[in-house]
Image (cartoon, rainbow, N blue to C red):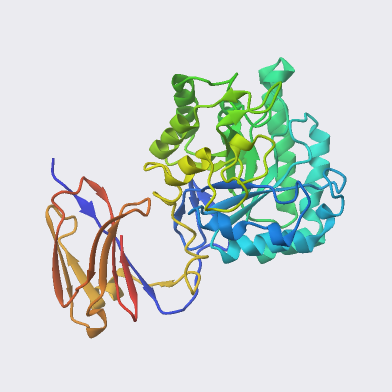
């Protein structure tokens, strides 16, 4: 079979800032950053407020060491929901966590925990008003380039009502009203929607996702399931079928809570085959967030012993260091907006690029030729990445005026060629 590697050409210049979008957004099943980069959300859940907030115990910096590109943050609307009661009415505390995520190049995902596992549509509509408070709207506006709102944790019932069809109809109707309220309030960032039955019902969520997507005038929704599937999908075959169903919608899905143990009559009662599920996520480029970084009621379900990265649990060693899906060994691409000095760089035309550098042939079969006549590219790095951002080939600082790269060992597909110098960075797709 002939090897064809297609390269489109973009050039990123200087410190100019331009963004095609002001927020993270979605396109078909992809989550796209403000700079147009594809993001596979892979990270952890973190609940620093559940036991009483202390800035000294805030472990966002430790989470960043794992390689995560996102953090799902537990919050409550009701100041009485957890102790101490003062936490959830303090905007400064939430701002501090958001800023810590942003400064570490990670996307913060806020979720409201008040209606967890409840089945009260009217309560959800009322809870949506939390997002429309002035101080919350101001926070969202300030961080809209990088924030995601996971509206409500694990709310509503479908299967548990005994009438799946009616349950799905009610679910869609409730969330349609919520989406409209949020968008009417001027909030444009992505909205993440959990499945029913404490987040576990991926089958119904996949069924409803197209209708829910149509209900959003901005078409900016992400769908999330929580894989506590002991009684729902406890075999590889069942898990595969669910992930395939979600992928077939061509809409963005994530595993919002992925764990190794599930509680029932007692804590850590059931062992979950999370490793197989993570292999499926890798196969389908589906995002996930491990539950939880620290201080869970089930200690075996923690990624770390005490919030410190160096003290990983057995579960944490797998989440961070597994050769296929580990956050550290195979890290997800981070938002370009948060991880470059200038946010997004100015994109200029292929015609301009060709005046600086030429590659040929395109498509290429075996050998790619690179040619430049400008001194500023001398000693530039040459690197090739796959669409997931994995570095496949690095040739170091040895570019002169011409370079030949043998690609005969590469399979067919689209790759990313980066030729960068100290003055400018050139990216070819």
Residue 270, by quadrant, is top right
Q: In the image, 326: left or right of 214?
A: left
**100 shown above or below 217:** below
Residue 237, by quadrant, is top left
Q: Residue at x 70, y 16 (%)?
A: 163
- Locate the N terminus by quadrant: top left
**Count of number-bearing discs:** 0
Q: In the image, 96: left or right of 258?
A: right
Q: In the image, 379: left or right of 221?
A: left
Residue 311, image x, y percentages: 54, 49
Q: Residue at x 67, y 40 (%)?
A: 296
- Locate the C terminus by quadrant: bottom left
Asked whether residue 13 is in view, the answer is yes
From this viewpoint, which residue is outermost toward the bottom? 375
From this viewpoint, which residue is outermost toward the top? 162
Residue 148, image x, y percentages: 62, 52
Q: Residue at x 45, y 22 (%)?
A: 236
Asked whether residue 28 is in view, the answer is no
The residue closer to the viewer here, 310 or 282, is: 310
Q: Residue at x 44, y 25 (%)?
A: 240
Residue 91, by quadrant, is bottom right
Residue 165, image x, y percentages: 66, 19
Residue 149, image x, y percentages: 66, 50
**351 shown above or below 388:** below
């Amino acid at each position: 079979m002939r090897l064809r590697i297609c390269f489109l050409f973009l050039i990123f210049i200087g410190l100019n800032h331009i963004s095609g979008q002001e927020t993270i957004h979605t396109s078909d099943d992809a989550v796209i950053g403000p700079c147009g980069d594809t993001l596979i959300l892979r990270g952890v859940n973190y609940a620093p407020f559940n036991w009483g907030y202390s800035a000294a115990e805030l472990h966002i910096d430790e989470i960043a060491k794992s390689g995560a590109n996102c953090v799902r943050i537990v919050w409550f609307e009701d100041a009485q929901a957890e102790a101490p009661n003062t936490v959830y009415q303090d905007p400064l505390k939430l701002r501090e966590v958001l800023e810590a995520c942003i400064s570490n190049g990670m996307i913060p995902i806020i979720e409201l925990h008040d209606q967890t596992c409840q089945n009260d549509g009217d309560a959800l509509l009322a809870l949506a008003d939390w997002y429309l408070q002035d101080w919350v709207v101001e926070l969202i506006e300030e961080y809209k380039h990088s924030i995601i709102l996971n509206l409500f944790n694990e709310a509503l019932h479908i299967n548990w009502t005994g009438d799946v069809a009616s349950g799905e109809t009610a679910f869609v109707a409730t969330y349609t009203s919520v989406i409209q309220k949020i968008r009417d309030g001027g909030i444009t960032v992505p909205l993440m929607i959990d499945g029913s039955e404490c987040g576990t019902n991926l089958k119904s969520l996949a069924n409803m996702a197209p209708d829910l997507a149509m209900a959003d005038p901005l078409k900016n929704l992400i769908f999330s399931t929580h894989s506590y599937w002991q009684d729902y999908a406890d075999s590889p075959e069942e898990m595969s079928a669910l992930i395939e169903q979600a992928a077939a919608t061509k809409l963005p899905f994530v595993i919002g809570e992925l764990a190794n143990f599930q509680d029932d009559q007692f804590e850590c009662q059931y062992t979950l085959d999370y490793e197989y599920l993570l292999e499926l996520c890798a196969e389908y480029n589906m995002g996930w967030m491990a539950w939880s970084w620290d201080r869970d009621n089930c200690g075996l379900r923690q990624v770390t012993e005490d919030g410190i990265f160096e003290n990983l649990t057995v579960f944490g060693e797998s989440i961070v260091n597994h050769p296929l899906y580990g956050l550290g060994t195979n890290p997800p691409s981070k938002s370009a907006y948060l991880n470059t000095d200038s946010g997004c760089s100015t994109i200029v035309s292929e015609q301009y690029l060709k005046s600086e550098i030429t590659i040929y042939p395109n498509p290429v079969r075996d050998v790619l030729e690179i040619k430049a006549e400008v001194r500023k590219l001398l000693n530039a790095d040459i690197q090739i990445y796959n669409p997931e951002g994995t570095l496949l080939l690095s040739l170091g600082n040895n570019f002169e005026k011409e370079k030949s790269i043998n690609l005969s060992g590469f399979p067919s597909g689209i790759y990313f060629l980066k030729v960068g110098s100290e003055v400018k960075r050139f990216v070819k797709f």
